[in-house]
Amino acid sequence: MARPPYRTYGSATYAPSSSHDPSASIWDEIMAGVRSMVQRAWTYGNGRGRRTAWALAVKGGHQLRRNMVRRRLLSFPHLLVALWILVLFWGERWTFASKVNRCDWDHWEDWPPGATPHRLVFVADPQLIDPHSYPGRPWPLNPLTMRITDNYMRRSYIQVQKILHPDTVMFLGDLFDGGREWKTAHGNFDDPEWAKGHRPADEAKHVKQWNKKYGEKYWLKEYARFGRIFLDNWIWGGTIPAPFQRGRKLISSLPGNHDLGFGAEVKLPVRHRFSAYFGETNRVDVIGNHTFVSVDSVSLSADTSKIKDQVDLRNIYQPVNDFLDEVKVTKRRAVEKELRFWRGEVEEVTQEHRVEELESADFSDLPTIDPGENASDLPTILLTHVPLYRDPGTPCGPMREHWPPIKPAKGQTGPVIPDHRNAISVSSGYQYQNVLSDEDSIKLIKSIGNVIHVFSGDDHDYCEVVHSAQKENVREITVKSFSMAMGVPTPGFQMVSLYNPVDSSGKPPSSSSGRTLQTHLCLLPNQLSMFVTYAILGVLSVLALIARAFLVPALKLQPFALEPLHAAPSAVLPVFKAKDDADDDDSERERNSMSSATAASNLPSARFASSRTKTQPLSEGRNGSMASPYVSGKDKGKGKTGPGKWGWAQSRGPRIQIRRDTYYDGKSRGDPWRPAAAGHRPMLKVVLEEIWTSCWRVVWMVLLVYGWLAWLG
């Protein structure tokens, strides 16, 4: 029996494909399958697919036309969307500029007229959110948290640069949250034997996954992410320095415990990687006629670790000790180079060019840039990630957000001491220690010398203390975190104004007041309160839309929900309006013959009778009988036509209702024609449709605007 031929829809008969070739390779079969799929897709696209796409486009265009009318654009749900857009732009954009504007330098600086201070901003603990921040959190939440916190810091930092134009920006450590956990490409990254078991239980179960999934490449991505937020946007502050300033600077080389670890558990490969990309962790900079000394205090703490006598930790703390041993000489050299620049001299040491025999060469009197111990010294500022030691319960002052200070008793002028709630807790744990040891704190002050101020981070909240006489009564400010995710509702940054006029030898003039530094805490928006505002506005919006939905049928308001689209009327069915019984017959006879013929030709079985007048229109019923739309002589007096099978010949045709609400200003809106409704819709159905349609319209438009703002950053 012959096999029936294969057919496709609308195509000619074709022969089946040849049988499977056993010698064909897998690649040939894959390519044949791909070609077959492409051919089918092409056929569908040129046939039914094109028609479907066109129908959808027409329907979408018609729906858009129905929505783009003035009455609908100015409807209550759209006005609510406009309100939401204003609130979103305020909460996601304008509030940042407003907050930073309040901190303008001119609002709080108090220098003599004509002063040209060097303006500096400290940024502490940005701590970029990563998988280490919230281990085990499901996929959608972690990326969303990262995006929100990154956008917050980016928007704040851009306004800092645009409005304040700081001459220098310095970071106080903890650039990343899990920087110490991401495996290095070189070196031993494993936890030492003595440190195993120190991790918290909820973190220990993720270590294997972190070591496998997050390595050097991930750290480099985090480094690029940090650069996109802070380094790329630094240019918003301009490239031209302020008058009498050497240039703009950005220094981010001070590490924190989240970048390297703390004390004995600092891993050398992690520190080498950090310093390779951010610079030396121990350094001296002369800025605004002040000497800034940055110290890697997290590595220094290994020297006072409890297990120092059990484990050799010299590779961790010795570089810091070597730096502190030479820091006074380094300071003098840095100051001398700065003074040479302002005197117009060569900054580096000039060497005398001469030829000597190696055996007789004199190395005892080599030229040096160090002017000696008697040289003038600029005021010194110490930068450390971990705050210096203080007695437990030492209050941080009224600007600390966590807990305000205890109210003193009546007649007491000073603060209440101890005040443990208002103080930084003197405690430690895995990879952290809230304050340095007393020994390390005194060592830092004595080794550096001439320290007039200390700035630190790590605590995430503001704290200002004056240390004991052992630490030379130095004042220390612990800077607020710049991130909204560090447990402090209101982030901030520290502004410092430096003005220290000196002569060519580095000595201040006799008229100097002695005060060379002023500080100001600048608070950023409380983003959590803004989210609460969004939630309250969301609830009020839903309630308002529900109330309006109930008022639509009660007060006969214009509904927001559109009527469903109806298909175009068939050419077979009549689409004329109902006529009155007393319609004039003559008006029917005066119709144009061409239009009559056209109307008749639209019927599937239209015929013209040869015995009738050519201009007289005819219509044929479905039973084949001919029915005239005109009134016969017999029925002329009655004013009625003979009834047809489908009622076409009756004087009353199908009733078509004209929507009065679709016409105004002489223009058509929406579908002007629709069949007459059989009855009114139930009130509850109208209300529910209004609630769903209006709420959904507000929700997707608001989410679209918020997503666009989040995508822009």
Image (cartoon, rainbow, N blue to C red):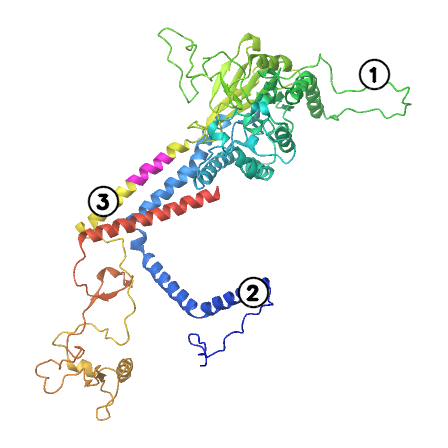
Q: Is residue 526 above or below residue 112?
A: below
Please, what is the dominant secondary structure of the magenta stretch? helix
- In the image, what residue occupies the spot 45% across and 34% down? 96
Tag 3 near tag 1, CB within 8 Å: no
**Residue 103, position in %: x, y?**
47, 28
Helix, strand or loop at label 3? It is helix
Looking at the picture, which amino acid does disc 1 mark? Answer: Ser
Q: Which mark is residue 532?
A: none
> The N terminus is located in which quarter?
bottom left
Q: Name the residue furthest front.
A: 1
Please tell me which residue lies in front, 164 or 695: 695
Please tell me which residue lies in front, 257 or 151: 257
Residue of label 1: 364
Q: What stretch is highlighted in magenta?
A: 531-539
- Compared across the picture, whether 62 is left or right of 472 comes to left
Q: Name the residue furthest bottom.
A: 611
Residue of label 3: 547
Is residue 536 found inside the magenta-colored segment of the image? Answer: yes
Mark 1 burial class by Cα count in 10 Å: few <14, some 14-19, many 20+: few
Q: Name the residue furthest left.
A: 638
Residue of label 2: 29
